[in-house]
Amino acid sequence: MNILAVYSIKGGVGKTSSAVNLAFIAAHSGFRTLVWDLDPQGASSYYFRIKPKIKGGSKNLIAGKRELDGLIKGTDFENLDLLPSDFSFRNLDLILDAKKKPTLQLKKLLKPLEEDYDIIFLDCPPSISLLSEAVFEAADVLLSPTIPTTLSLRALAQLKIFIAEKNLAKLTLIPFFSMVDRRKKMHKDIMRDLLEKHPEMLGTIIPYASDIERMGLERRPLGSYLKKGPSVVAYNGLWQEILERMAIPSR
């Protein structure tokens, strides 16, 4: 089982759309896939037409009174399940703080699922918090969408510093460009500069596109309503790059 957290300190960078679309492609390719919507806003749950609600809320979940497999919902797509969000997730930091070894709690909850899924995507809220640290301990890979703007690059630099300070050597950070507008000179200049200086950046670029924005109207992954186009090609290319970087054989 491989756990991929889609994460950024900064909001509005395309985390949820990336998590949902990559999970759809993984499932369509034959990987048994789960998305855990950890954001109290519940955007992933919304895209999959599933109510963002779990019985007992986050308190019972972290207390061990509810196991994850009993909360998982099937989606409309083969090989793709969802663990919905809940508005109580806004209190996860406080609930984790009350536990011994709080940063290991998500890893503990996910372990029983390792025989059921090949890939788990964690759709994470934007923050640096105790929940973030628990995500970093649970995940194998941190996929970080990055818009080629000053503030988004600053957030990526802060994330790198945090990972180094916490000595998270086993965690692989894989940033990629998201919501790119090639008409903007600044976007093009920053991408060229960053790709030259930072080889860890993936080469595939996710565009700023109305096709992706349509997900909110369609309430489903991009590839389920659009069979071709630059956005579909970009997400498929991104998934192939991720598989290669993680040394996971394609299905």
Image (cartoon, helix red, strand yellow):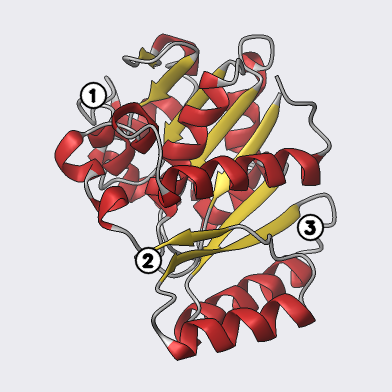
Q: Which residue is drawn at 35% across and 14% down?
A: 73
Furthest residue to the left?
A: 217
Compare marks 3 and 1 and give the one earlier in the sequence: 1
Density class for disc 2 (Cα within 10 Å; few <14, some 14-19, many ≥20) is some
Quadrant (top left/top right/bottom left/bottom right) for the N terminus: top right
The kind of residue tagged 3 is Leu
Whether residue 159 sits left or right of residue 19 in the image: it is right
The kind of residue tagged 2 is Gly
Compare marks 1 and 2 and give the one earlier in the sequence: 2
Q: Residue at x 66, y 20 (%)?
A: 118
Quarter of the rendering containing residue 242: top right
For the residue labelled by badge 3, is the local secondary structure a helix, a strand or a loop? loop
The residue singled out by tag 2 in the image is 11
The kind of residue tagged 1 is Ile
The residue singled out by tag 1 in the image is 50
Quadrant (top left/top right/bottom left/bottom right) for the C terminus: top right
